[in-house]
Structures are given as structure tokens and as C-alpha cells.
Image: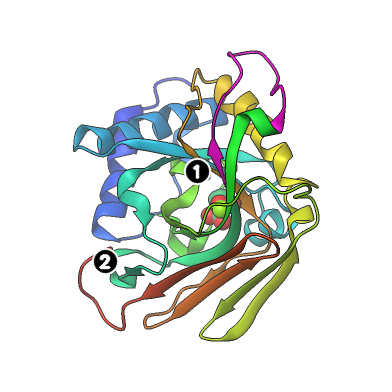
């Protein structure tokens, strides 16, 4: 991967998100590999930090077979979350601020005492203070939601917005909880937390390992999105979305009936 214009690619992806305008895939044309794509992601997120946003967490992507099959990519990836992406539970987004938004039901962790770089997670109960049901709104900046692995990594793993439901203490088991995604009162997806790497707790090990490779340390107080339990579904205007995770409760998101502000 020689001579990739990291800043230029980040600018293209950032402008696509800012203007809600899809672009074509980039990686194959410019010879971008996964390593270089994480450098683009860093620059893309830095662009947000430069305008005053703050890092608030990390998201894992493609942690389930359903998600991998949906987009034709077969590796777990990660991306960064900023404060501006967070929508309050029950809050409203304007789909006009996105290109082709999709929603998916997730499990979120509130991070606590984390190991030093290179050390394994001691105990999940030490590393995670609380868990919550969550909704991730993903929005690929590529036309037709079609991309290669480096493309989607560069695009910050399609991160766009997220909702965290009520936090609860970590329950005894997280590995086989029923998950339901409803759109306008209709069941859109049904699954189990087992779909998230067999157990969503594994996503934290993966997150620490994969982000650690790039010198990124997870922080106490950060949110960690462990990944989706089902495939994602399109978010139309005027929708009421509920993600229900057994034992953890419900996170909800609305979309405004017509164009307006981005979050509300
Ligand atoms: O959160 C996710 O699993 C998304 C990862 C990127 C692939 C996609 O846009 O579906
Ligand atoms: Mg996700």
C-alpha cells in the first residue's frame, strides 16, 4: 500500500457523511488494505474531534454471521463512537441526515476497570460496570451499502448513531438472551445474544485485542457496543423502533416523519 492519501480519503468519507451523499468504493482503486484503512478511520474520526466532538466509546462490527452474510464481509471490525452520535433513549433522528440508515439490536457495556495494554481481561465483572440493550444506527457512506473490508473499516465501520437503553448490573449469563427488533410495532428481527461471537462478552476481548493493535486503549466510562444479534433493517421516516433484550429491557428510537434537524 504505497502512497495512499489518508487525509484525502478521510475527507471524502467525512464529506459524504456530512452531506448525506453516497460515494463509490475506494479501496480497490487506490490499493487501500485493512491496515491503511484503520489509518483512514483515525483521520476520519480526528476530523470529528477537531470540530469539538469527544470520543465516548468503541463499537464492534460484523460480530455475527447474520451481519457478515448481509454485507459479504467475514471479519470482525471495530470503529469509534463520539458524543454527537449518541441519541437519548426514546429520542428522534431525521433520516434525511443519513444516506440509507439501518438499525440493529445490540448489547452495550459500560466500561470500568480495564487491563493494561497486552494483558487479558481479568474478570468481565471488573471490566464492565453495567450492561444495556442498545440500538445502533449504521449508515454506510458507500453507494448501495456495498463495500470491501478495507472500505468499511475506513468508513468507521458504518457508525452513525446509537441509543443506549437503561443500564443494569451485569446479569449472570449474557450468552443466550432473546433479542427482538420491532419497527412500528411489527417484529422485524428475532435473535439471540449467542449470535454475537457465541457470547457478547467475547466481543470485549476482541475489541481490546484489535483496537490495542492500533494503539487504541479503551477507557473507563466509555460505552462499548458489542455488536448486533441480527441483520440490520432499513430505518424509514416516521418509524418507532424498539430493541428488546431479555433480562436487560428495551431501547427505543424514533425517526422524524420528514426532514429537519439530525438528532432530537
Ligand atoms: O455494526 C456493524 O456491524 C456494522 C459494521 C459495518 C458493516 C455494515 O455497515 O453493516
Ligand atoms: Mg453494529
Q: How many marks?
A: 2
Residue found 37% across the figure and 80% down from its top:
237
Residue found 43% across the figure and 26% down from its top:
39
Please report the bounds of the magenta region as a residue range: 109-124
Rendered view: 115 above or below 235: above
For residue 161: magenta? no
- Residue ID for mark 1: 151
Which callout, 1 or 2, points at the residue further toward the start of the chain? 1
Within 10 Å of disc 1 (Cα), the crowding (few <14, some 14-19, many 20+) is many
Rendered view: 264 above or below 228: below
Instruction: Give the mark toward the camera: 1 or 2.
Output: 2
In three-dimensional space, the C-alpha distance between marks 1 and 2, rounded to whole angstroms, equals 30 Å
- Residue ID for mark 2: 264
Residue 1: x %, y % from top left? 50, 23
Residue 193: x %, y % from top left? 73, 56
Residue found 39% across the figure and 38% down from its top:
56
Amino acid at each position: 500500500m504505497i502512497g495512499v492519501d489518508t487525509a484525502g480519503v478521510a475527507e471524502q468519507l467525512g464529506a459524504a457523511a456530512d452531506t448525506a451523499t453516497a460515494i463509490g468504493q475506494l479501496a480497490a482503486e487506490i490499493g487501500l488494505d485493512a491496515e491503511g484503512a484503520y489509518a483512514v478511520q483515525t483521520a476520519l474520526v480526528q476530523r470529528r474531534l477537531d470540530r469539538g466532538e469527544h470520543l465516548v466509546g468503541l463499537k464492534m462490527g460484523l460480530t455475527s454471521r447474520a451481519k457478515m452474510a448481509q454485507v459479504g464481509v467475514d471479519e470482525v471490525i471495530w470503529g469509534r463512537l463520539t458524543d454527537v452520535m449518541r441519541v437519548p433513549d426514546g429520542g428522534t433522528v431525521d433520516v434525511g441526515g443519513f444516506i440509507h440508515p439501518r438499525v440493529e439490536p445490540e448489547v452495550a457495556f459500560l466500561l470500568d476497570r480495564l487491563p493494561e495494554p497486552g494483558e487479558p481481561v481479568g474478570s468481565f465483572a471488573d471490566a464492565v460496570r453495567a450492561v444495556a440493550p442498545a440500538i445502533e444506527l449504521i449508515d454506510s457512506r458507500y453507494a448501495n451499502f456495498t463495500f470491501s473490508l478495507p472500505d468499511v473499516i475506513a468508513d468507521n465501520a458504518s457508525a452513525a448513531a446509537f441509543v443506549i437503553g437503561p443500564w443494569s448490573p451485569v446479569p449472570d449469563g449474557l450468552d443466550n438472551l432473546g433479542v427482538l427488533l420491532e419497527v412500528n410495532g411489527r417484529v422485524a428481527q428475532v435473535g439471540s445474544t449467542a449470535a454475537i461471537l457465541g457470547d457478547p462478552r467475547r466481543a470485549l476481548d476482541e475489541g481490546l485485542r484489535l483496537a490495542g493493535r492500533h494503539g487504541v486503549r479503551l477507557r473507563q466510562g466509555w460505552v462499548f457496543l458489542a455488536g448486533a444479534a441480527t441483520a440490520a433493517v432499513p430505518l424509514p421516516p416516521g418509524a418507532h423502533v424498539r430493541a428488546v433484550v431479555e433480562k436487560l429491557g428495551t431501547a427505543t428510537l424514533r425517526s422524524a416523519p420528514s426532514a429537519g434537524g439530525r438528532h432530537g
